[in-house]
Image (spheres, rainbow, N blue to C red):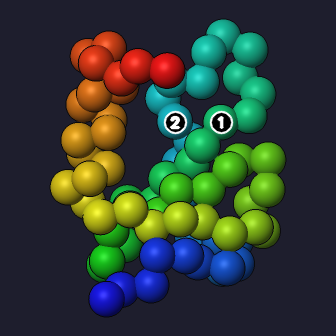
């Protein structure tokens, strides 16, 4: 099984911020495209901190659900 955590996310280049971060900018999540074992996600407030790696299909399902409003609190 692939590792699901990257301890030092700053060691990787190419992070991009979420396109839905609101008008104030501020803190959000960042994702890294093209990672071989899934989609790494980190907190933009802590770029040297850890990142979680989600399976690509699971991440795609989450983004679709977030966009279409089918997630509930």
- For label 1, the crowd category at 10 Å Cα-Cα, with few meaning under 14, some 14 to 19 and many 20 or more, is some
Side of 34 relative to 15 (left or right): left
Residue 39 appears in the picture as rendered = yes
Q: Residue at x 65, y 36 (%)?
A: 28
Disc 2 marks which residue?
A: 18
- At 37% across and 72% down in the image, what residue appears? 35
Residue 34 visible in rendering: no
For the residues labelled 1 and 2, say whether their Cβ atoms are less than 8 Å apart: yes
As displayed, is residue 22 above or below residue 48? above
User: Under tag 1, what secondary structure?
Assistant: loop
Q: Position of residue 2 (x, y in %)?
A: 36, 86
List the residue tagged with mark 1: 28
Give whichever of 12, 45 is nearer the camera: 45
Task: Give residue 21's position: percent from left, percent from top.
Answer: 59, 24
Q: Secondary structure at mark 2?
A: loop
Residue at x 61%, y 56% (from the top left corner): 42
Q: Position of residue 7 (x, y in %)?
A: 67, 79
Residue in the picture at 49% in, 21% down: 73
Answer above or below: position of 55 versus 63: below
């Amino acid at each position: 099984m692939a590792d699901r955590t990257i301890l030092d996310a700053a060691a990787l280049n190419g992070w991009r911020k979420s396109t839905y971060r609101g008008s104030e900018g501020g803190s959000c999540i960042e994702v890294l495209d093209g990672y071989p074992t899934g989609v790494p996600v980190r907190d933009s407030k802590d770029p040297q901190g850890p990142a979680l790696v989600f399976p690509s299909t699971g991440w795609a399902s989450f983004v679709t659900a977030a966009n279409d409003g089918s997630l509930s609190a």
